[in-house]
Image (spheres, rainbow, N blue to C red):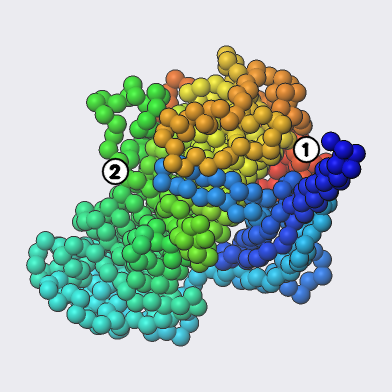
Amino acid sequence: MSKIAQRAHAAVLAMLVIITASSAGAADKVAAKEFYAEPPTLISLGFEWQIDGDDNHNASVAVSYRKKGTQAWEQGLPLMRLDHEHITENAFNYTTPNMFAGSIFDLEPDTEYECRFVLNDPDGVVGKRENVVTVRTRFEPKPAVGGKTYHVYPADYKGQKLQPAFTGLLAAYYLGASHSDNFNTYGPRVQPGDVILVHGGLYKDDRFRYGGGGPGGTAPSDGTYYLTQSGTPEKPIVIKAAGDGEPIFDGDGNFNLFNVMAANYNYFEGITVRNTDLAFLAGLKNIAGARGITLKKCHVENVGRVLYTDWSGSRDFYIADNVFLGRFDPNHLMGFTGRTWQKYFESAPPKLVSEYAVKVYGPGHVVAYNHIANFHDGIDVATYGNPDGTPNPIRGRMPVSIDFYNNEITNMEDNCMEADGGAYNIRIFRNRCFNHGHRALSVQPAFGGPVYFIRNIVYHAPEGGAAKFTATSSGIVVYHNTLLAPVKPMLGAVSNIHFRNNLILGRSDTLETFSVDTYTNYSSSDYNGFGINEGAEFSFGWSSPPFSIRADNRSKAGMSPQQRAQAEAGSRETRNFKTLKEFTEATGQDRHSIVVDYSIFQKAAPPDPNDPRKLYNPADFDFQLKAGSAAVDAGEVLPNINDGFTGRAPDLGAYELGQAPPHYGPRE
C-alpha cells in the first residue's frame, strides 16, 4: 500500500472511531418521551416516564411530592428503571418499554398532591428534564346525600314496614320482579344516588319453583340478581344493611348470586352472602365488565369465589373491611402439589372447592383491611395474558396502579397474594399471611413492574417458601418484609429484582435460606437479615449471566420447551454458597446484611417441620423486635418507605421498634 493510501486508510479508521464514539455517546444519553400519571388510588399514586437511549443504564429519576398549597417537598423513592426485559412464558410474549415507573405511598385520600420528577444522566439529557404534575387521590366511596331511599324486606317479615317498601331486592332495584318468563321485563327504578336499605332476614329464592320465587324476592330461575343500573363515583347506587338485623342472601347452591357486569358504581355494605359458587361477577375478558364496584363491611361465606373480574375495562374497585370465608377445611392446611403434601392424599388431591376470594384486572383497584380464610388463593391480579393492544398497549386497559394492603389472610391452599398478570405499580403492602400451602407471595409473571412487596409478614409456607417469583417476571421490589420461610427460585429466572431491609428466616421443604435466579446483573440485594438452617447443603445462591454483561433476557418466543430450557440454562451461571460471607465475596450482594435467628423477636418460634398441616394463630406471635437485637438499626434509609424511623437507622423487617404494628383485617 502506498504512503498516500496508508494515510487515507488511517484517516478513514480515525473517522470511524470518531463516528462510533459519537454514536455510543448519543445512545448513552437519555431522551425524555411521554410521561403518564396512572389512575390514583386512595393512598397511592403511580407514574410512568418513557425514554429513549441510556444504553449504559445510568440515568435516574428523582421523586419528590407535597400537598398542594404547602411549601416543603418530601422525598420519594426514585422511579425504577425498566429496560426491555422480556416476558415469555406460556401465552405471554411482552417486552417492557425503555422507561421508568414507580409509586408514591401513604398519602391522604381525596387530597391534591404536586409531584415532581427530575431526570438525570451523566451522559446528558435530551428533551424535558423535569415534570411537575398535580394529581388528586381518590375519595373513599360512600352513599350520597339527597337520593331516594327504598326499603327491602323478606317475604316472611311480619312487622311494620318503612315506606316505600318492597319484597325482595329486585322489586326495589327495578320497577317490579317476577320469577317467571317476565323476570326481565321491568325497567330500572333506582337512579344515581339512591339507597336501598335491606332489612334483616333471609333472602333465598326457591329457584326451581316456576312462578313461586320465595323469601329472596322473585329472582330469575338461575337464582342470579342481574343488576344493570349505573351510578357515578359521587352518586353510587347503594345496597346497604338497614341496621335492624343481618340481611342474608343465600344462593341456594347456584353458580352466581350477584351479576354486576353492567352496573358501574354499585355499592354494597353490611350484607351477608352465602351458598353460591361466585358471589359477585363483575367482568369477563373480552365480553363486558363493571367500573367502580364497592364491597364494604360485608360477610361472605361458603362460596367458591367472592368477586371476580378479568375485563380489562374494569377499574377503581374498592373492597374493604370484609370477611370472606371459603369452603376449605378450616382446621387443617392442605396443599395440592409438591412432596410436602403427597403423603396426605388419600387417592388424589382435594377438590378445588374455593378458588380465590378476590381477583381483579384493570387499573386503580383497592383491596384493603379484609379477613380472608379457607381458599386456594387470597387476593389476585387476574392472569389475563398480554395487555390489550400489545405491543402497543391501550392506556386505559392496562393493569396498573393496584393496591392490596392491611389484609389478614390465612389457610390458603396456594398463595396469599398474586400479582400475576400485572404491569406497572402493583403495590402489596402491610399484609399478614399465615398458613399457606405453597409460596405465599406470587409474581408469575409481571410485565415490567414495579411490583412492590413492602412490610408484609409471611409465616408457615411449608412447600416452596415465602415467594414465587418466576415465569420470566420483571420488576420486583421486596422491602421491609418479615418472611418466616425461605426465598428461593422456581420455574425460571426473573429480571430486575431488588431486596432491601428484609428479615428472611425459617424453613420449608428445602433448607436454603435465600437464593435468586435472575437474567439481569442489575438485580440487587442488601441490608437484609438471614436465618441459616442447620443441615442445608447451601444457604445462599445467586444465578445470573456472567458478571461481565449487564443482562441476558433475550426473547425465547417460538422456542420449543426443550430449546427454551437449554437457552435459559446456558444464559446464567449457577452460584451456591454455604455462608453469607462467601456469598457476599463472590457476588457483591448483601454487603451490609447480617445473620439472625428467632431470638430477635418478642415472641416467635419456627413452624413444626413435622406437622405441615397445623394452622397457626397470628395472635400467638409477636414479630416486633427486641431492643438491642441485631436487626435493630441495621437497615438502609428508603424515602417514603421508612420515614420516621426511631433509631440511628431503620430496623429490618416489617416492624420498626417503638412504633405500633399495623392493623390487619376489618376496622371497627
| Label 1: which secondary element | loop
Q: Which residue is mark 2?
A: 353
- The residue drawn where x is 34% and y is 24% is 342
Relative to 557, 122 lies left or right: right
> Is the residue 553 above or below the residue 279 in the image?
above
Residue 637: image quadrant is top right
Label 1 packing within 10 angstroms: few (<14), some (14-19), many (20+): some
Q: Which residue is mark 1?
A: 633
Q: Position of residue 56 (x, y in %)?
A: 74, 46
The kind of residue tagged 2 is: Val
Q: Position of residue 269 (x, y in %)?
A: 41, 66
> Is the residue 579 above or below the residue 68 in the image?
above
Q: Position of residue 397 (x, y in %)?
A: 48, 64
For residue 262, say whether it is visible: yes
Relative to 104, 188 lies left or right: left
CA gap, disc 1 and disc 2? 45 Å
Between 380 and 150, the residue placed more toward the observer is 380
Cβ atoms under marks 1 and 2 closer than 8 Å: no
Label 2 packing within 10 angstroms: few (<14), some (14-19), many (20+): some
Q: Of label 1 and label 2, which has the lower sequence position?
A: 2
- The residue drawn where x is 56% and y is 66% is 39
| Label 2: which secondary element | loop
Q: Position of residue 28 (x, y in %)?
A: 76, 50
User: Which quadrant is home to the N terminus?
Assistant: top right
- The residue drawn where x is 35% and y is 32% is 336
- The residue drawn where x is 38% and y is 48% is 356
